[in-house]
Amino acid sequence: MAARVLHARGAASAGGLLRRAAPCSLQPPLRRLTFSNNRPREDSWLKSLFVRKVDPRKDAHSNLLAKKETSSLYKLQFHNVKPECLEAYNKICQEVLPKIHEDKHYPCTLVGTWNTWYGEQDQAVHLWRYEGGYPALTEVMSKLRENREFVEFRKARSNMLLSRKNQLLLEFSFWNEPVPRSGPNIYELRSYQLRPGTMIEWGNYWARAIRFRQDGSEAVGGFFSQIGQLYMVHHLWAYKDLQTREDIRNAAWHKHGWEELVYYTVPLIQEMESRIMIPLKTSPLQ
């Protein structure tokens, strides 16, 4: 009697798992299971439903996902500015940051600089590229400490800030290289906090998903964090305006295969955030 009760409970538990497996529109109807003493076969079938296939190679994310032809490192900065100081902050940034960008003695380039329009307010976002990776970053930081104008800039800037943070990023191998573009455009920075251990899966899925978003020129760059908040992914997009953004995003759902890739990537995400940003006049990305 006890064995039959335990067997019935196991069947009910497995049935509950099957009912929660996936929306009917994304998977074919599941056939009713008949339970028998053939437990290994049933267990194998159930595992095939819930275990995702990942690349079994043993290597660092940076080696598996980043571009091999470049050794560029990116720094993403978020500065939360006192509301009354935003105009003055933008002014000094537009005076000083382009000088560093244009100076050949610094192995770095300013990819883009923005103010957040929708999202966290009174926020500035800067994206830098360091050609040569960590040695280039170290060289730039060392030289800037000796740059009197930059030291004065940092002192003035510090009085205008409420908080700041940064992340060091690498570029996904399957994304576009972020290059200067003319405007006017608005930019969307979509940031994803992934579940630890899922970065390879994300890369596998988005290597296919990005093809659905390449009809226009909205894809600017895709990055993943190395230092700072880990398991962070940032996708940067450019649109003519908010309505164009809406139209392009809606059009993706009419392409066969897009909905499946969204279905499999959503469970990898813990949190996500979208910022709509306006470039400053001196930003290479307009």
Image (cartoon, grey):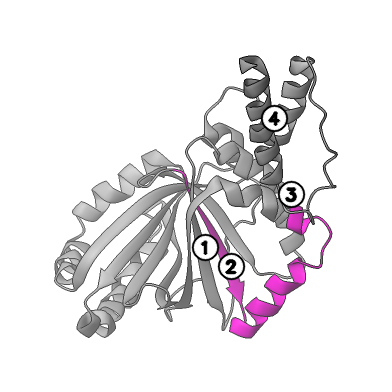
> Residue 241 magenta-drawn?
yes
- Give the x, y percent position of residue 281: 43, 81
2 and 3 marks in contact (CB < 8 Å): no
**Mark 2 or mark 1: which is in front?**
1
Q: CA distance from mark 4 to mark 2?
A: 47 Å
Residue assigned mark 4: 11
- Give the x, y percent position of residue 172: 59, 47
Could you tell me which secondary element the residue under label 4 belongs to? helix
* Relative to 219, residue 245 above or below: below
Q: Residues within 10 Å of mark 3 (few under 14, many from 20)?
A: some
Q: Quadrant of residue 149?
A: bottom left
**Mark 1 or mark 4: which is in front?**
4
The amino acid sitting under disc 3 is Arg
The amino acid sitting under disc 4 is Ala
- Give the x, y percent position of residue 202: 61, 44
1 and 4 marks in contact (CB < 8 Å): no
| Mark toward the start of the polypeptide (4 vs 2) | 4
Q: Residues within 10 Å of mark 4 (few under 14, many from 20)?
A: some
* Relative to 79, residue 56 above or below: above
| Mark toward the start of the polypeptide (3 vs 4) | 4
Magenta-highlighted residues: 231-260
| Mark toward the start of the polypeptide (1 vs 4) | 4
Could you tell me which secondary element the residue under label 2 belongs to? strand
Mark identifier at residue 237:
2
Instruction: Report the residue at 57% width, 54% height from top.
Output: 222
